[in-house]
Image (tube, rainbow, N blue to C red):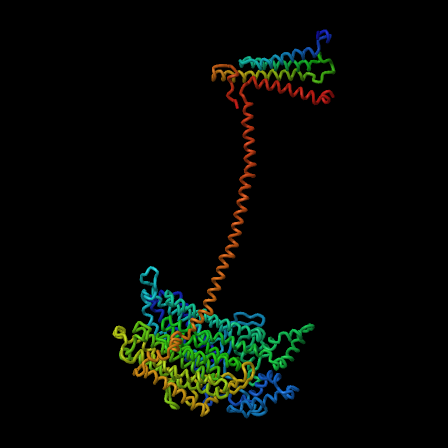
């Protein structure tokens, strides 16, 4: 139905995919009690955002002259990937330590900073 | 060396040596020998050197100014001037009471007055003088005046340390230093108790135990030295300001010495009493000084030259008795202009030329003088100065301090309170004599007369040996004042000198008796003649001298000459002024009472049999160091009145310094009615002299006889007499109730006033201050409440709100990760929705 409306594959389609991934990631983060699940949600959110960057940065998709970003979108996506890798490393270290201390990875048990 | 420089040098040194001794003892007294024993040697050596210097000065004086046999040098030469002065002094009365014819012109008025005065004066020895004949130049007595040091000079005021030396100065130096030397020697023996710690039985401690203290031997001599310095300062002083300074110094020395045993309540009270009573007199003296300085701008006795400008500055004597006026008294220009200040201002108003104003004032002064301006001022100046003398010389009404002053050690009584300090008042009256008007002299005569009578009567009933002598001193000082007041300048000062000798002798004798008996009460003595012969016989000489014993017209002890001179002068005065005849009666009656109480004293102490055997057994003659001064003073008490026919003697020496213009009879009719002040040499007239001498002899003999009847051969019992006299005896025993009267009149009102004021202080002023403090506390309380509730409340409330907010906020911090994510999501969505709704237009744009 949407395809029919658009006629051809364009930015909007990518945005829809990115939005779905983002939403899925957020829901994953909100509902998963397992810390690894939460981390996965985070990856989904970041990569959803990456799709948006790439979509906006692609001259193919946006059309020549209409892209305000040029290659910037791809560069931003690369940064985000880099950051996601670093973050994942740190997050996994925290999770490992958390497990060592509490014998579980249930984030609901991680309420030591409760006010 | 020139005498004008030699005399001040000698006397100045004699004056300053005791000061050096005082300073030395003050700083090193405790280190002078064991217990400060050598302090006595230092002080005695100092005063003895002063004596030597004074005697040398006397020799120098006599070498340059040998006394002349006809020593009434300027008598007879003032008659012309006398008439003139009478005009001046009586003109005021003439203008107001003269008949109309006289008022038509001044010349006529003067002539009228001349005749009136001469008529009036015919009753006296000379009434034949006339202004146009016998114009001799009156000769002023020789006097050397000068300044050592100028303390302050500015405007009209010039304060200096200076000298005024004439024969009385030299004579007084010799007398003071001689007596002081004797008393220093005597005191070295008398005060030996003070060499060791003293237990004073007369001091009541609250703990009840005996009172002990360190000996104060050196301090006694320290005060004596300072006293000698002060006394000699008065004698040598060249101006009244300096006299006043040393006057006060003498007062403070007296305070030290009366209060020597200051732990005794009676001694400290007596010292304070003497000091306070003297302040009363000194207040009058200050008024006199101000009146003189305000009008004349100088307080110097002698004329001098201003060192800064070289202008001659006439002294007080020259101003009041100008040379140009034959040394007769006239009101000085300065005082006239001072008194006529309103008229001077009238002349000066509307004129800018000061010179012209001054000329006009100068021209108007003689007229004002005729109108009587300034006469009262001169009178007040004289009476004011005399007030100071009343205090110091213990005259009525300020005599109450002297008997109490006997609380001091006996040498002090002898030196300070009989021979020298109290004589300072008489000396000042004598020194200041040229400035005193006949009215002032009349006041002086009456004060002296009343004093001599009251004091003599009190002495009759006193039983304390020193108090008898104290009242006798007061009485004799009254004699001197009276003598000066009735014109007996030489007589008064002559008696001052002779009295100094025999009264210090009497006091030292009484001290010797007290030393032996350890009591002052004559009722416990008696029969001491055998035990203490030196004391008894020298005291007999003193008693004979004070009553003026002698073989009439042949020879006598010193008092014989001086007392006869006073009697003769008083008799002459009474003859010239019958209205004031009572003065002569006072003198004659006083002579009788004096003889009675002096021999009552001697008989009670030395004659008969001992009344208290315990005391008589322990009595002993005093050591040599004490009896030797007695012998020396006894010799002087005998010979001090003698004079060679050449005029060599105390009286002749005094005659050399007789104030110019006083050798004549002066009549005035100014303030206190008509007074005729007789010339002193007139009292040597045969009839006066004989009457006076016989009166003196008869009264003295009667007094001695009565005393002998009552106390030597008790034919008349004193107790019976006392009972017969009844109230009169009680009255005298209580000393005329003068102390009680003063207590009621002055002390009690003062205390009551003080109590009232202290009540005001406590209630009103303290109340006010306490009220202010209370109000301040109340305001502070309100302030504190405001601070605690409002200010602190606000701060606390802010803290509490923050705290509660924090407590509430911490609930948000649940620690649940998924919840946080939900918040983030919901928050982001909410912000996005809100932003979309609110900023639609801008986003759309």
Q: As rendered, which of B348 and B37 lies closer to the eye?
A: B348
**Can the viewer see residue B281 in this picture?**
yes
Q: As rendered, which of B221 and B732 lies closer to the eye?
A: B732
Residue B37 found in image quarter:
bottom left
Total label count? 0
Residue B43, image x, y percentages:
38, 71
Residue B458, image x, y percentages:
39, 77
**Can the viewer see residue B57 in this picture?**
no
Residue B361 found in image quarter:
bottom right
Relative to residue B790, is residue B420 depicted above or below? below
Residue B580, image x, y percentages:
49, 84
Q: Is residue A21 left or right of residue B36?
A: right
Residue B467, image x, y percentages:
37, 75
Q: As rendered, which of B158 and B562 lies closer to the eye?
A: B562
Relative to residue B568, is residue B620 depicted above or below? above
Q: Is residue B741 left or right of residue B287?
A: left
Q: As rendered, which of B499 and A86 lies closer to the eye?
A: B499
Relative to residue B192, is residue B554 depicted above or below? below
Q: Is residue B630 left or right of residue B254?
A: left
Residue B193 found in image quarter:
bottom left
Q: Quadrant of the C terminus of chain B?
A: top right
């Amino acid at each position: 139905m949407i395809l029919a409306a658009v006629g051809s594959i364009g930015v909007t389609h990518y945005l829809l995919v990115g939005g779905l991934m983002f939403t899925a990631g957020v829901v994953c983060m909100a509902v998963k009690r397992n810390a690894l699940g939460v981390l996965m949600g985070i990856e989904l959110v970041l990569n959803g955002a990456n799709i948006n960057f790439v979509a906006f940065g692609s001259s193919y998709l946006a059309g020549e002259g209409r892209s305000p970003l040029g290659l910037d979108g791809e560069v931003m996506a690369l940064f985000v990937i880099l950051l996601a890798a670093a973050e994942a490393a740190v997050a996994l270290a925290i999770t490992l330590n958390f497990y060592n201390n509490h014998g579980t990875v249930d984030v609901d048990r991680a309420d030591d900073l409760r006010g | 060396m020139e005498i004008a420089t030699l005399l001040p040098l000698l006397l100045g040194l004699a004056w300053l040596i005791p000061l050096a001794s005082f300073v030395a003892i003050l700083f090193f007294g405790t280190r002078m020998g064991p217990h400060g024993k050598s302090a006595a040697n230092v002080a005695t050596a100092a005063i003895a050197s002063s004596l030597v210097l004074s005697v040398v000065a006397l020799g120098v004086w006599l070498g340059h100014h040998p006394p002349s046999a006809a020593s009434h040098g300027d008598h007879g030469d003032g008659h012309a001037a006398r008439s003139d002065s009478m005009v001046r002094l009586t003109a005021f009365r003439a203008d107001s009471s003269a008949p109309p014819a006289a008022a038509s012109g001044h010349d006529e008025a003067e002539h009228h007055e001349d005749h009136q005065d001469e008529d009036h004066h015919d009753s006296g020895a000379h009434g034949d003088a006339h202004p146009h004949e016998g114009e001799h130049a009156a000769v002023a007595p020789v006097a050397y005046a000068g300044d050592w040091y100028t303390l302050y000079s500015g405007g009209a005021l010039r304060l200096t340390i200076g000298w005024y030396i004439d024969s009385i100065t030299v004579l007084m130096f010799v007398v003071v230093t001689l007596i002081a030397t004797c008393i220093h020697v005597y005191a070295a023996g008398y005060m030996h108790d003070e060499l060791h710690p003293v237990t004073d039985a007369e001091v009541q401690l609250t703990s009840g135990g005996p009172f002990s203290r360190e000996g104060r031997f050196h301090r006694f001599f320290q005060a004596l030295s300072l006293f000698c310095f002060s006394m000699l300062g008065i004698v040598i002083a060249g101006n009244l300001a300096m006299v006043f300074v040393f006057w006060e110094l003498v007062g403070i020395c007296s305070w030290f010495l009366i209060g020597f045993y200051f732990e005794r309540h009676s001694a400290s009270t007596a010292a304070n009493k003497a000091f306070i009573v003297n302040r009363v007199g000194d207040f009058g003296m200050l008024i006199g000084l101000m009146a003189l300085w305000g009008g004349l701008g100088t307080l110097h006795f002698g004329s001098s030259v201003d060192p800064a400008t070289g202008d001659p500055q006439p002294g007080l004597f020259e101003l009041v008795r100008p040379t140009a006026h034959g040394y007769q008294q006239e009101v000085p220009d300065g005082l006239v202009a001072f008194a006529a200040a309103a008229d001077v201002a009238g002349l000066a108003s509307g004129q800018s030329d000061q010179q012209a104003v001054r000329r006009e004032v100068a021209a108007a002064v003689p007229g004002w003088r005729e109108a009587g301006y300034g006469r009262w001022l001169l009178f007040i100046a004289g009476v004011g100065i005399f007030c100071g003398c009343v205090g110091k010389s213990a005259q009525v009404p300020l005599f109450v301090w002297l008997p109490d002053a006997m609380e001091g050690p006996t040498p002090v009584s002898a030196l300070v309170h009989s021979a020298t300090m109290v004589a300072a008042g008489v000396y000042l009256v004598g020194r200041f004599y040229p400035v005193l008007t006949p009215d002032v002299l009349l006041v002086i005569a009456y004060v002296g007369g009343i004093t001599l009578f009251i004091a003599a009567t009190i002495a009759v009933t006193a039983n304390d040996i020193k108090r008898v002598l104290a009242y006798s001193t007061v009485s004799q000082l009254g004699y001197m004042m009276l003598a000066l007041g009735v014109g007996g300048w030489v007589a008064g000062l002559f008696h001052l000198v002779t009295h100094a000798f025999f009264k210090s002798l009497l006091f030292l004798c009484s001290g010797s008796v007290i030393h032996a008996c350890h009591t002052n009460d004559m009722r416990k003595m008696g029969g001491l003649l055998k035990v203490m012969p030196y004391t008894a016989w020298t005291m007999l000489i003193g008693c004979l001298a004070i009553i003026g014993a002698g073989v009439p017209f042949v020879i006598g002890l010193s008092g014989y000459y001086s007392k006869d001179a006073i009697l003769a002068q008083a008799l002459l005065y009474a003859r010239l002024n019958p209205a004031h005849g009572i003065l002569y009666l006072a003198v004659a009656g006083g002579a009788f009472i004096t003889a009675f109480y002096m021999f009552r004293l001697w008989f009670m102490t030395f004659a008969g049999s001992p009344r208290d055997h315990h005391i008589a057994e322990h009595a002993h003659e005093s050591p040599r160091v004490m009896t030797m001064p007695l012998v020396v003073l006894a010799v002087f008490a005998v010979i001090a009145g003698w004079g060679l026919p050449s005029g060599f003697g105390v009286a002749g020496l005094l005659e050399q310094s007789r104030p110019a213009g006083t050798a004549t009879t002066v009549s005035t009719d100014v303030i206190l009615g008509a007074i005729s002040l007789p010339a002193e040499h007139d009292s040597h007239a045969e009839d006066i002299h004989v009457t006076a001498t016989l009166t003196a002899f008869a009264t003295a003999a009667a007094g001695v006889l009565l005393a002998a009847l009552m106390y030597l051969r008790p034919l008349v019992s004193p107790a019976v007499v006392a009972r017969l006299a009844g109230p009169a005896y009680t009255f005298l025993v209580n000393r005329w109730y003068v102390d009680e009267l003063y207590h009621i009149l002055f002390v009690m009102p003062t205390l009551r006033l003080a109590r009232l004021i202290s009540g005001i202080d406590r209630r009103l002023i303290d109340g006010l201050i306490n009220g202010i403090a209370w109000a301040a506390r109340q305001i502070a309380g309100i302030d504190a409440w405001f601070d605690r509730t409002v200010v602190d409340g606000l701060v606390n409330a802010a803290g509490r709100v923050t705290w509660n907010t924090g407590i509430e906020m911490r609930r948000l911090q649940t620690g649940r990760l998924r919840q946080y994510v939900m918040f983030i999501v919901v928050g982001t969505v909410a912000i996005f929705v809100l932003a979309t709704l609110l900023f639609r237009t801008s986003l759309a744009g």
